Amino acid sequence: MSTNFEYKGAAILVLISLILVNLASVSDSTENHEKTGKTRTIPDLPIPAQPLCPPGSDCANTHTCSPSSSNQTLEVETSWTATGSNRMMSSPHVIDLNGDGVLDIVTGTGIEEESTGSIIALDGANGSILWEVNASGEMFSSAQFADLDGDANFDVILGGRNHQLFAVNGINGSIIWQFDSSNNERSKWFQFYTGQFIDDQNADGIVDWLTSNGGDPLKQPGEPRDSGYLLVISGSTGEVLSVADTPDSRETYMSPLIYQPHPEMTSEILFGTGGETWDGGLWATSITDLMSGDISNATRIVDPAPNVAKGIMAPPAIVDMNLDGIQDLVVSTFDGRLIVLDGRNYSEIWTVDVKEHVHNGPVPDAESWASAAIGYFTNDSIPDVFSHFTIGAFPMYSGSISIMIDGATGQILWSEDTSHTSFTSPLAVDLNGDGRDEILMIRGGGELFSDSGEYVFYNEASVFNTCLMSSNTLFNQSQMSIGTPTIVDLDLDGDLELITTTTTGYTNPTATWTVSRMDLNTTTPQNMSWAAYLGTNYDAVFESDS
């Protein structure tokens, strides 16, 4: 189903046109590169017969639900709220830093225009600040956690604008290392995105750090653009172990991922190129090539749409969509497509052109800033897909569309158009214990009213019940929300909490951030399908119940 809305005649400004200010990229070339068609080494595993779950088969009733048991209204109670200055784009991630048995929250803050920012750690029990590290740029990426100094405790890595990247002691907030911009590997450094820990590459006993660097906010539309980089950085010292330019000389905005289709297959690195107005694609390269400093032989596994200058901004989701034992990829493109790629050979399992389904379709543009959520929304055992796309073209949007797709067939099961924009990833968690995942949707942005020239901010949270095919509103707030929230059992008592973030403005002195812990008063399920930015485990891998 689709719900149409009337335009208010006011432009909904991309939060990101002001918040992700100047991220727009214009290429002086829209040349398309062909896929290289590399041969993959595939284990001798059976490929299931089609269709995967025909009526009456064993897998057809895995996630059945009863409307009577699903008809439960979710109750939300705010446990604590923490506030501070600056805006907050970073998505909160959690880990127990102080050893009290309650998970703590780490996120970033900042104002791009004023070259200020910080990394903050909040006590999950009461919201007090455990520590804060000041930076000279907006820290907009999301935290990842590992022991980087050998003390057997979790430490934090988080990056952002002005080539700011910090490794921080998780207990006391002391700086283990900070990225050295005088590194002579490259003459220019840009923005750091959320990365992944990679196996120890320099044999010092500490995991190392895979990340991407790109996006020049000083460039104006039409100006030539510098290539983005993939890097491996020593987790213990911050030394650059390897750096490589993108193979198409495009910028990069995507958080890179480590992708292992099967335990018997070699791990690969996935990265995206291109931007809002710059063509690019989704690529796969080897760790060996990256460590050599040359990824020119990378395989482009998703090409840009013909004659469309838009790239890949959002990390794909990693999930076995056809139940053949090989991890596949769910890709949200900035040109408005949802593509499922078979992990065996990168062939398309199905593709949905979202533009065809907005306002009963088609529309010229629909763009994706965020990864899709993967969960169980139908009766079978095959994971399904839920995603947000903004309606319009950067930097002017008229709203967004939320869309739910049957993972087995690519059939659209439900969609809704709204005048509110959405830049966060949806989440998929069974919130009522009926065996079917619900979907948490955050639509949070800012609307510019042409008659007054004023902005009105909004942060609308709702839960979509995939059994009843209906939604209810959790809350509406007069702030905007850019960071993807986290659903988690914070105090490990068996009940779920929701960690949300909001921002009240764009620039100092008006901009403030808020982090809230909201008790959901619902039992923690055995599996959390997609509970945070980059998935439940922050690695973009679907948390399967198999």
Image (cartoon, rainbow, N blue to C red):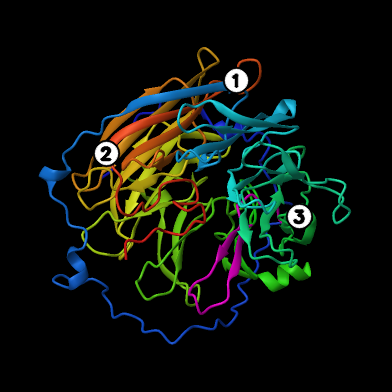
Q: Earlier in the sequence, mark 2 or mark 3?
A: 3
Q: Earlier in the sequence, mark 1 or mark 2?
A: 1
Q: Nearer the viewer, residue 18 or 26?
A: 18
Contact (CB < 8 A) between labels 1 and 2? Answer: no
Kindly give the residue lying farthest to the top in the view shown: 452
Q: Residue at x 39, y 45 (%)?
A: 427
Q: Earlier in the sequence, mark 1 or mark 3?
A: 3
Coordinates of residue 299 in the picture (x, y in percent): 62, 71
Q: Does the magenta segment cover residue 239? A: no
Quick check: 515 left or right of 520?
right
Query: Which residue does the numbered mark 2 point to in the structure image?
Result: 522
| Crowd band around label 3 with a 10 angstrom C-alpha radius: few (<14), some (14–19), many (20+) | many
Q: Which residues are magenta?
A: 250-272
Quick check: 494 left or right of 330?
left
Question: Which-is-in-front pick, marks 2 and 3?
Answer: 2
Quick check: 385 left or right of 505?
left
Kindly give the residue lying farthest to the left in the view shown: 68
Query: Which residue does the numbered mark 1 point to in the structure image?
Result: 511
- State how far apart marks 2 and 3 are (Cα): 47 Å
Coordinates of residue 71 in the picture (x, y in percent): 16, 39
Mark 2 residue type: Thr
Q: Nearer the viewer, residue 269 or 388?
A: 269
Residue 227, numbered circle = 3
Q: Quadrant of residue 375?
A: bottom left
Coordinates of residue 67 in the picture (x, y in percent): 13, 45
